[in-house]
């Protein structure tokens, strides 16, 4: 009788042991390798990060903005590690030299052709259960932003040409061009 094969459960140590230049995320002990981002993806990350940082700075806000690669340890175990495209963290006690321990307040993911399943499903569930307050999925192919406000238990979609209200900052909205 053949023994049943069990899938290996990976940990954060396995992520840190990856060869130089190889990036991956870890969700519930499973490794998901990441392809290098394209130019449009990086332009969106930089533009959005700049707009958010500028708003926080000019309004004397306490939150910090971190573009990827930036480590986020969502759970209090060693089985989940993600690198959101943009993380906004308002609790300074969560920030360490290694990254963020716990859920950021606001996470933005820029969808790539190979990351759709991950961004729209796996990460949506993971971020919601980890207590992220707000999660945006920016889809350049569809010129669409899906905004999940977990505090209000709502989901809205916005085209790139519309001002998108930021749930964690009253009176702040972003426009993606």
Image (cartoon, rainbow, N blue to C red):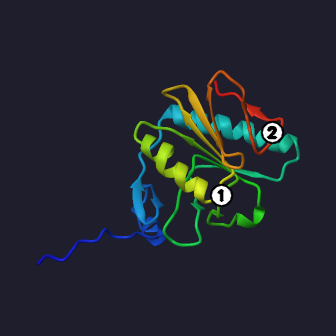
Q: Identify the residue at horizontal 11%, vertical 78% (top origin).
A: 1
Residue 43 placement (x, y as % from top left): 58, 33
107 lies above or below 41? below
Left or right of 116: which side holds 44?
Answer: right
Q: Secondary structure at mark 1?
A: loop
Query: Which mark is first along the chain, 2 or 1?
Result: 2
> Can residue 138 be seen?
yes
Whether residue 8 is situated above or below residue 90 in the rendered picture: below
Percent position of residue 174, x then y:
72, 32
> In this rendering, would 164 be left or right of 71?
right
| Mark 1 surroundings: few (<14), some (14-19) or many (≥20) residues within 10 A | some
At 79% across and 39% down in the image, what residue appears?
54
Which quadrant would residue 17 be assigned to in this image?
A: bottom left
Q: Which residue is mark 1?
A: 131
Quadrant of residue 168 in the image?
A: top right
- The residue beneath circle 2 is 55
**Which residue occupies 57% across, 28% down?**
144
Q: Foreground residue, 104 or 155?
A: 155
Q: Residue furthest front?
A: 153
Question: Taking 1 as reference, is 27 above or below it?
Answer: above
Which residue appears farthest toward the left when viewing the image?
1
Count of numbered circles on the image: 2
- Near mark 2 (Cα within 10 A), the count class, few <14, some 14-19 or many ≥20, is some
Residue 175 x/y as whole percent: 69, 27
Q: Which mark is residue 40?
A: none
Q: In the image, what residue occupies the spot 46% across and 64% down?
A: 28
Instruction: Say whether residue 68 is left or right of residue 57.
Output: left
Indicate the quadrant where residue 152 lies.
Answer: top right
Residue 61 image point, x, y percent: 85, 48
Q: CA distance from mark 1 to mark 2?
A: 23 Å
Relative to the observer, which residue lies in front, 103 or 124?
Answer: 124
């Amino acid at each position: 009788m053949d023994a049943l094969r069990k899938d290996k459960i990976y940990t954060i140590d396995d992520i840190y042991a990856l060869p130089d230049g190889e990036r991956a995320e870890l969700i519930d002990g499973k490794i998901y390798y990441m392809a290098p981002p394209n130019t449009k993806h990086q332009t969106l990350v930089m533009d959005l990060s700049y707009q958010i940082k500028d708003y926080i700075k000019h309004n004397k806000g306490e939150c910090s903005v971190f573009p990827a690669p930036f480590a986020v340890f969502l759970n209090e175990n060693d089985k989940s590690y993600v690198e959101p495209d943009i993380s906004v963290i308002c609790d300074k006690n969560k920030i360490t030299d290694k990254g963020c321990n716990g859920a950021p307040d606001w996470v933005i993911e820029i969808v790539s052709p190979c990351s759709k399943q991950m961004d729209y499903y796996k990460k949506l569930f993971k971020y919601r259960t980890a207590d992220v307050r707000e999660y945006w999925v920016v889809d350049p192919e569809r010129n669409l932003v899906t905004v999940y406000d977990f505090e209000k238990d709502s989901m809205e979609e916005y085209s790139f040409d519309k001002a998108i209200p930021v749930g964690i900052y009253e009176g702040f909205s972003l426009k993606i061009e």
